[in-house]
Amino acid sequence: MTAQSHRSAPRTLDRRTLQRDHRYLATLLRSGLSVLDVGCGTGAITSGVAKAVGPKGRVVGVDRDAVLLELACEEYGAIPNLSFERGDAATLAFRSEFDIVTAARTLQWIPEHGTAISKMKQAVKPTGMLVVLDYSHTRNQWEPDPPDEFKRFYRAFLDWRQANHWDNEIAAHLPELFRSAGLADIQSHVQDEIVVRGDPDFPERTALWTETIESAGEQLSEAGLCTRLELQAARDGYAAWVKTELKRQTLWMRTVTGSVV
């Protein structure tokens, strides 16, 4: 299979906020800090970072996807202490410029994990910090079990990711990757995304997988992992199940931090 890239659905990215969706980072931010957000997408979280560090701070959002960057610039380009640049985590050229370098849900889409972490580390000032949030997709859980149509899609989704050398256990592997990069004071913080029926954000949180079927489905079909009929069945079956049966969704996530010394 030819290696591919993936664009998350902009509406999924637009819903995210610093306080809810990168919450450990939110506790670290202070006025005047400089922050690099790698894989900033449409800039929704990045704009929250800019607000948190205030006018004396500096925030740069980097993404390899020109379409997402254009959306970010349109929505948040007027914020004085925030700028956006096109770039890839594995080829960053920054050197000792930022108090915090962060990536949220980004390394899951990058095969060169070690290179990306090394490049991000190089962008951190001495005594600064690297902060990475990501999933381990094989550990996600739903209660009760999803319908068979969705489970078939999810197995194909994991197989597609593995074929592209995207680590389905990246969150669990981050501490060792940080150690290999020479980071110090490495800590892993539980950041599971848990939503329960009755929560105000239950519909939008559970919509993640409908949107994933839509955004990744064509590539899964082209790879021979799912037919279009199977994708439609997965989408319809999942949507009906969410409305009537799903009680709890737990996405296994960790924020891993490390210091540059």
Image (spheres, grey):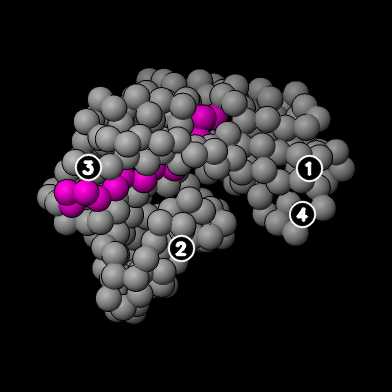
In the image, the segment drawn in magenta is 124-137
Q: CA distance from mark 3 to mark 4?
A: 39 Å
Give the vertical position of 242 relative to 19 (above or below). Answer: above
Q: CA distance from mark 3 to mark 1?
A: 44 Å
Q: Tell me the amino acid under the disc marked 3.
A: Val
Provide the secondary structure element on which disc 4 rests. loop
The answer to whether residue 187 is above or below residue 55 is above
Q: Quadrant of residue 214?
A: top right
Element type where label 1 sits in the image: helix
| First reached walking from the N terminus: tag 2 or tag 1 | 2
Disc 3 marks which residue? 260
Residue at the spot of label 2? 44
66 magenta-colored? no
The mark nearer the N terminus, 2 or 4, is 2
Residue at the right extreme, as displayed: 244
91 or 124, nearer to the observer: 124
Q: Would you say 182 lies left or right of 163 here?
A: left
Helix, strand or loop for disc 2: helix
Q: Which residue was labeled with disc 4?
A: 199
User: Which residue is tagged 1?
Assistant: 242
